[in-house]
Amino acid sequence: MASFLSALFQYLHNLSPLSITRYILLLILTILILIYTQTRSSTPTLSLPPSPPSLPLLGHLHRLGRLPHRSLQKLSTLHGPIMYLRLGTVPTVILSSASAVEKSIRFNDTELASRPRSAVAEILLYGSTDVAFSPYGEYWRQARRICVLHLLSTKRVQSFGFIRDQEVSLLIEKIRSSSLRNGRFDSVVNLSQMLFKLTNDIVCRAALGHKFSDDGTSKAHNLLKDFTVHLGTTLVGEHVPCLGWYDWLTGIKKRMRKTAEGLDSFFESIIEEHVKVKSDGLEDGKYGDEMEGRDLVDILLNIQENGDEIGVSLSRNNIKAIILDTFAAGTDTVYTAIEWTMAELIKNPQEMKRVQDEVRSVVNTAGKLTEELLEKMTYLNAAIKETFRLHPPIPLLVPRESTKGIELMGYHIPARTQFIINAWAIGRDKNAWERADEFMPERFLCSNVDYKGQHFGLIPFGVGRRICPAIGFAQATISFALASLLHHFDWDLPNVMKGKPLDMSEINGISVHKKLDLILEAQPYST
């Protein structure tokens, strides 16, 4: 043995550095193949869904690309609407058709109601103690019930109508005033930035009692934007633990923690403000009679202090997690939906004219735009549905996890498998939708299809037990804001962009936005 090692060392000593490097790479590759082979051989043979070829260690992680919803849709055209992937060490099933989702949810909703562990959510959302990312169980049920009952019920959503009216009116006036600069007419506005501020201010007033953008807290806006980007980030170490050093090398976890600390400080100050107001005896009526003296923070603090009728208890971090969840869902997804709708209407001038003619006819007949009139705007509502079909704000929804083994479409899916529903692929399924890639609102005019979870071909807010509870809040804000923008202004591309196609490229996050802000020319409309 000693002579063998001596001969080996002598042989290696005589090799060139390049040869040694090649041998080292070959050794590493051999070890990876052995690990992969051992993993495959130690896994019981199951009737799993079709799966594309994978790499050792990484599995199919490299196939996600910069825009995972598009990459997964392409894979599904080759391997079918139910597909099995290994994202590093995480077994994952991808659902890419309405029928696959329907069969999954109708028969296995309870088994698929939990969430996989997410290191990102644990950093950003106080250990996943919010509503969207918390595991299925008693805490999730009570936290969701609190949000639905105290912020998102039909009565509460309607009570926030005066907030939407005031904030949208401020937006309209801001667009008008921005048209006159230095005594000359300049009608170009950054609609994306304005829409983000609008939705953020509406959520602030509904959840926190007042808005903060006028108090110089643009830092909070930037933190919220960073938060939504981070929430859609994939940590390599979470999927391939032995490569966790890569996340440290890129600094992504450090940036996440910095964002989390900034938001924590912001929400802590808001909570302390509410505690002080309550201790000073100024709670009743502090935000006007319409709010009945209470916002979401007041309600959560009251539950923390006294419990509620079911006896749920909340920690300070639980309160902040629920508030942060409300902000992420209420701001980012809503403004994204309005932005994509306006972009599609700009791309399709005939559809823009048809929507505007309807909105203006309804408003001019009534004399003033009110939320009660929105139901009469059938083509506007159809355009919103069509936008949700083409651009669901969260294209891959929030992942689920099976709590036990299930049978699905002839396949056996083991417990603790991650399920990803590709709502973007479902909305563009050529087998389900005529001219699936075109913006055609009229397809919904004589259709009872809606986006509230009953029709599996249109699920921008999810489906089943984990459907987003804020549908009513989002619908009211999106519809009223769009109707106001389309009633008060004629919209077009700026002169420098006319004759060029509108850039509809995307940027990934928990919500998928337009990569470039929507810069438009707004000409005030007069009857």
Image (cartoon, grey):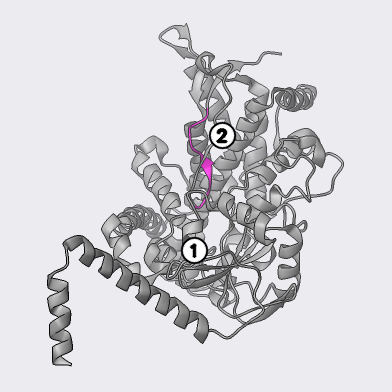
Few, some or many C-alpha atoms within 10 Å of disc 1 (few <14, some 14-19, many ≥20)? many
Q: Nearer the viewer, residue 156 or 12?
A: 12
Disc with the residue nearer the chain's start (2 vs 1): 1
Q: Which mark is residue 300?
A: 1
**Residue 460 at least partly seen:** no
Q: Residue at x 53, y 74 (%)?
A: 139
The quadrant the C terminus occupies is: top right
Question: Per the image, is 516 magenta?
Answer: yes
Foreground mark, 2 or 1, reads 2
As drawn, is 365 to the left or to the right of 523?
right
Q: Which residue is mark 2?
A: 504
> At label 2, which amino acid type do we have?
Met
Outermost residue to the right: 446
Question: Residue 172, position in %: x, y?
Answer: 56, 25
Q: How many marks?
A: 2
In percent of width and height, residue 523 lies at 59, 15
Instruction: Sort mark 2 into few (<14), some (14-19) or many (20+) by Cα contacts within 10 Å.
Output: some
Front-most of residues 38 and 289: 38
User: Which residue corresponds to the image point at 14% horizontal and 78% vertical from the top-left?
Assistant: 9
516 lies left or right of 22: right
Residue 351 location (% of width, % of height): 73, 27
Whether residues under marks 2 and 1 lie with C-beta atoms below 8 angstroms apart, the answer is: no
Q: Which amino acid type corresponds to the residue marked 1 in the rendered image? A: Leu
Q: Give the extent of the magenta segment.
A: 510-518
Q: Secondary structure at mark 1?
A: helix
**Residue 90 seen in this snapshot:** yes
Where disc 2 sits, the SS reads loop
Q: Position of residue 246 (x, y in %)?
A: 31, 61
Would you say 375 lies left or right of 332 here? right
